[in-house]
Amino acid sequence: MEQPSWAQGQSTPYYDSQSQQLGDFGRNTPNSQWNRNPIAPTPDVDFPASPPPAQRSQTVAFAPMSPPHRGSPSGANTPSSIGLGIGGRDNNGYLLPRRGSITRDSFQQDSDDSPPVTPPLANDSSKSTFRQQEYPLTSPGTPGYYQYGPPLPPRDAPGGAGFTGSTWWRMVSSGWPMFGLFLLGFACALGHHIFYSQLDGRPADNQIKMMRFGGLLSYAAKAALLAAVLFAYRQQAWVTVRHDILRLETIDGVFAAVNEPLVLWNWELFKKARVSVSLAILAWLFPLTVILTPATLTVGSIVEVHDDMCPNIRTLNFNPEMDKNWRVATTINGQRGFSLAMSNATVENSAGMTDVEFSDTFFDYYTAPSEPYLLVSDQSILTGKVIPRHNVALDTCGSGWNCSYTISFEAPGYKCKELRRSEPEEKLDEAQLKTEGVPFNVGELLPNGNHSYLGNATLGDYASKQVDIGGTGGWPKDPPPYPKNLGAFKMEPKIYIAYSEATQPGQTPNNRSEEQFYKAYRAVVVSCEHYLVNYTVLFNHTFTEQNTTVLRKDYLHRIIETDYVPKLVYDGTLDNTTAEPMGNYVFPSDLKNYRLVQAYHAIAQNMRPLFDGYMQYHPFAMPMTKLSRTKLINTNTYLPIPNLVEEIPRFYENIIFSLFSEPRFLVVAWAAKPNEMSGAGIGNGTSPGYLYPCQKRRIFNAYVYNRRDFWIGYSFAIGAAVMAVVLGSAAISQNNFHVRDVHASSIVAATRAPCFDSLPWKSSKWGEVPPEILKTKLGYGIVVDAGLNGTPAPQAMAMGSGAGPWPGSPSTMAMMEGRGTTGSGERVYYGFAPREVLERTRAQRAATFGPGKARSRTSAFSFRNWD
């Protein structure tokens, strides 16, 4: 017969008639080996080196073959059935599909029986979506070898199969969607963490926008990781049905568990498809990621604290009082400054005598506290608090901030001590207390007397009227020489207090007839002296509130180091106070010291008279002291507050610290520059040289990121995804690196076995499956059935000896002629079938190739290639 043009030059002609090549072996005769073993090798056993030889008819001819591949030793190779997803290898480890082995689409049908004029394509593009066009051939080195196209390079040659044929490359190239989705999900989770970390501690602005963006990242991470899990689930689903014989309803559950949770109510599913069920449950739990992780970013109140330099911080410095001449106006930042004391002069109309030096006949002497000071002092006394400067927190701390700072300064203060404390029903020694200077009878106190309070704070006080004055300005009516002690500060009066306090908390008895009356009270005697104190004070500005805390007090010395002497001595003035030693009197001639002492004296003078008087308690309450207007007296019980010996100094300190409320006082200075008076307003307070160390705080709504809970939520999701990817990779490896899907076309291809027609189907308008069919047990594997014009799936064929639908078998040679079926008209493909069909297939295989080496059940984590 004439050779086609493509076969010219070959040593053996190409026969276009299948009967010419196969003879009786291609016919459906009782002696045909195809009838005896009509199957291809399956992945359930390890194949022998080659199929058993078959006798050839003298009429069998061979197609022309190209020389064997260089570097490939001759010898038998394992058969291959590429269409079944089973690939053989030559002795060099080449996959036969890469050697030009024929591959056919399982859906392809042969309809043209005319003889070919060119080698028959294993995949006709008009009948299949497969792009690879391959031709029938045998293993290299065997008779009748044919290879279309140039030979492949060796594995170790440039461009050979060493890289793309490696296991890891086949795994990546097959499962890249799963790996890519996992990496995308992990990247979204990491981006979610970075985004929340950037928001942590920041003001909670644009909350809805930020929460939505965080939810978007969470959803993206969940969607990508879930997609990777579902990809792995699909691969494991096919491995599951390939391994086990299951009821049809269980197979439904295997493929539908991720869509219908009710199918999980199947014991066989949990028993035989544990891996698939586990992945399905993970898929159902994955939406929790979207709920848990966004909730780790909340909004809460945050306290931000840092050290800073604050403006407009002031302190006290009494030195400017030493230089204050009331005749000269002191201007600070364009405003008049205030002194704490007012003075009289010995010369009438001396307002213009600014340049005249003081002498024995011309000098100033103290008369009273100044009105600006009385305004501040009265506010503090009546409120019992420190009066803050207007907008002090805003000027010092800045908008939205709280702050605190510590300053030190010298100012007057009272030092109190407890002279006596009686026990219940004990009487104090009045005579002894008299010798210690107590100016009243302590026997009048409860429980023996009727009074709850006795006080004297003006004994030996400076007389506001020193001499008879001739008119406004306090100039003496009598001409000079003036008395030596005119205007002299002889002493600072002590504060003597005696009061009763309750021995037990709660309501006290008011009637002496009550049994517990004499045991309910005790008498306490206290004295206080005026000192110069070095204060260390913490100022705390919180919103509009100002709190002061005295951190330390160092008592330096008494304002005037003299003691009262109870005798009258006429010295020419109206002030008959006598104190010793007289050498410690402070005279107007000691100008600077006198002005400083008069400022200290003026501060205390407005407070001391409050302690004078008494308070009757029995038979009814009758307060006869201004102290009842202050917080030092409990108006519910009309008893002094507990621990009065410590409360009196605090009460006086409130007045001292209230001086900051009026920056126009001469004694108010900048904390950074204590020798410079501050004046009212901001002034230089914001300049760099006037800033003072402080600690700034603010409470604001900020984002709070809970990293621990965030990664707990994501760790379960990522860990589950990692486990799913490992299982999916193992399934891909067991499926010979073929990625499987659950498309409708795949289900159709897997359910085309004619044996399904014998099941007890019932007519149903909606396609319901009868319950008895759902109980049918099916498996997935190689199915051989007799059907005309079928699709012989295993097309990795070569011409040689052998029987059955494998390389070199007569039935394979028949299919090469284009008749569409094997010699016996049987089809071979992967699909679902009952157990007996699959077992018959395995039996026929064993009869043809021998039992082979038994393969044990593969673990879900095994990467063993079943093919």
Image (cartoon, rainbow, N blue to C red):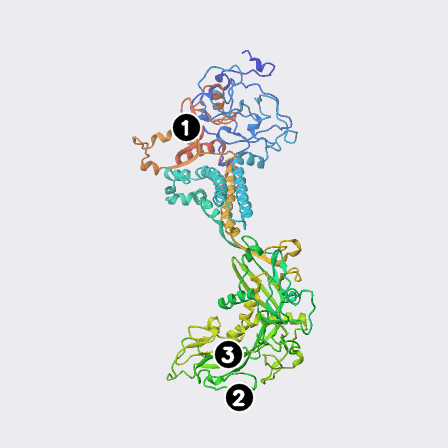
> Which residue matches tag 1?
785
Residue 490, numbered circle = none
Residue beneath the point at 47% across and 15% down: 114
Q: Say whether residue 783 is left or right of residue 568.
A: left
Q: Nearer the N terminus, badge 2 or badge 3?
A: 2
Counting from the top left corner in percent of width and height, residue 752 is at: 40, 29
Q: Amino acid at mark 3?
A: Gly
Q: Nearer the viewer, mark 2 or mark 3?
A: 3
Q: Nearer the viewer, residue 331 or 231?
A: 331
Q: Say whether residue 620 is left or right of residue 570.
A: left
For the question of whether residue 864 can be seen, the reply is no
* Mark 2–mark 3 CB contact (< 8 Å): no
Residue 624 falls in which quadrant of the image? bottom left
Q: Nearer the viewer, residue 635 or 146?
A: 635
Placement of the N terminus among the 4 image quadrants: top right
Q: Nearer the viewer, mark 1 or mark 2?
A: 2
Q: CA distance from mark 2 to mark 3?
A: 17 Å
Determine crowd level at label 2: few under 14, some 14-19, many 20+ residues with C-alpha closer than 10 A: few
Counting from the top left corner in percent of width and height, residue 526 is at: 53, 79
Q: Amino acid at mark 2?
A: Ala
Q: Nearer the N terminus, badge 1 or badge 2?
A: 2
Residue 455, numbered circle = 3
Residue beneath the point at 53% across and 49% down: 203
Q: CA distance from mark 1 to mark 2?
A: 132 Å
> Which residue matches tag 2?
431
Determine crowd level at label 1: few under 14, some 14-19, many 20+ residues with C-alpha closer than 10 A: some
